[in-house]
Image: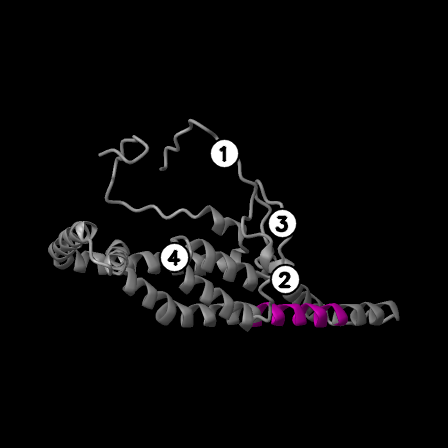
């Protein structure tokens, strides 16, 4: 079996999920990004598999009726011809949306919106907590250094080692919140919760223009929750996390 790029697929039934945009997010948010994307695709695929046999005959019949009605309306010379054509065109547009359009809209607005709200809120709280802990640790470290400088050489070595391990643990955890430096990166991101919200709403749920309204509404609610203005520079910039380089006449082996 060959794919659309003319590449022979060794295992066509196997789905490989590789999102380059995920690599521009902090390590601690990447798993959630993959899980949400995989769940979204899985739910839509399962729904379509169940509805495929039911909708196949019905959709074909509706399309035939719409084509016949359109042909009859075009031949009609009555004054309300324009109104008839417009109503038929609306029906045709509804058919073109696909049988899963309503399901996906509800999936985004009812299921994933609540789930993503909890995830983004958790990211926001954890990042703030980590920053507060670092500030306290730095203050404690400075006070410890002052005590040592004052001649307190009999300090318990075990306490010193424990505090050093704790500082190393916190530093390691903080590095998981850092935005990675990948090839083509040119933006200086600061807020993991903000960039996660932008990426998941724009590049996953808003990938299909048919669901732009649902994806945009989700994004607005997330921005309101993390207290970011829609037209601020940090929200408007960085939707494309890396520079774009177009290679003409090159076929990707993965595609």
The boundaries of the magenta stretch are 125-139
Q: Nearer the viewer, mark 4 or mark 1?
A: 1
Q: How many residues crowd around disc 3 within 10 Å: few (fewer than 14), some, or many (20 or more)?
A: some
Q: Residue 216: say if magenta.
A: no
- Residue identifier under label 1: 246
Q: How many residues crowd around disc 2 within 10 Å: few (fewer than 14), some, or many (20 or more)?
A: few
| Horizontal arrangement in the rendering, residue 62 relative to residue 93 (left or right) | left
Q: How many residues crowd around disc 4 within 10 Å: few (fewer than 14), some, or many (20 or more)?
A: some
Label 4: state its secondary structure. helix
| Horizontal arrangement in the rendering, residue 14 relative to residue 170 (left or right) | left
**Which of pointers 2 and 1 lies earlier in the amino acid sequence?**
2
Percent across and percent down for residue 136 are: 71, 72
Image mark for residue 46: none
**Magenta stretch: dominant SS?**
helix
Determine the residue positioned at 36% across, 37% down. Answer: 254
Image mark for residue 232: 2
Determine the residue positioned at 55% across, 48% down. Answer: 241
C-alpha separation, residue under disc 2 versus residue under disc 1: 29 Å
Q: Nearer the viewer, mark 4 or mark 2?
A: 2
Q: Quick check: marks 4 and 1 in contact, CB under 8 Å?
A: no
Label 2: state its secondary structure. loop
**Which of pointers 3 and 2 lies earlier in the amino acid sequence?**
3
C-alpha separation, residue under disc 4 versus residue under disc 2: 27 Å
Percent across and percent down for residue 128 are: 62, 70
Image mark for residue 187: 3
Label 3: state its secondary structure. loop
- Residue identifier under label 4: 37
Determine the residue positioned at 23% across, 61% down. Answer: 47
C-alpha separation, residue under disc 3 versus residue under disc 1: 20 Å
């Amino acid at each position: 079996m060959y794919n659309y790029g003319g590449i022979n697929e060794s295992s066509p039934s196997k789905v490989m999920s590789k999102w380059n945009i995920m690599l521009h997010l902090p390590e601690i948010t990447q798993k959630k990004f993959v899980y949400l994307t995989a769940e979204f695709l899985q739910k839509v695929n399962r729904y379509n598999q169940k509805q495929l046999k039911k909708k196949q005959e019905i959709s074909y019949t509706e399309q035939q009726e719409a084509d016949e009605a359109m042909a009859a309306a075009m031949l009609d010379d009555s004054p309300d011809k324009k109104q008839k054509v417009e109503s038929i065109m609306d029906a045709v547009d509804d058919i073109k949306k696909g049988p899963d359009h309503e399901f996906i809209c509800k999936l985004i607005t009812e299921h994933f919106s609540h789930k993503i709200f909890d995830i983004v809120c958790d990211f926001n709280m954890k990042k703030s907590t980590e920053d507060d802990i670092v500030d306290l640790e730095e203050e404690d470290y400075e006070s410890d250094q002052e005590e040592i400088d004052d001649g307190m050489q009999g300090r318990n070595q075990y306490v010193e080692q424990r505090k050093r391990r704790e500082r190393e643990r916190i530093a390691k955890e903080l590095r998981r919140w850092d935005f990675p430096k990948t090839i083509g990166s040119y933006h200086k991101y600061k807020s993991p919760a903000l960039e996660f919200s932008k990426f998941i709403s724009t590049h996953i749920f808003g990938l299909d223009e048919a669901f732009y309204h649902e994806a945009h509404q989700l994004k607005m609610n997330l921005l309101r929750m993390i207290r970011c203005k829609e037209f601020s520079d940090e929200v408007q910039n960085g939707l494309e996390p890396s520079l774009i380089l177009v290679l003409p006449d090159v076929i990707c082996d993965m595609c």
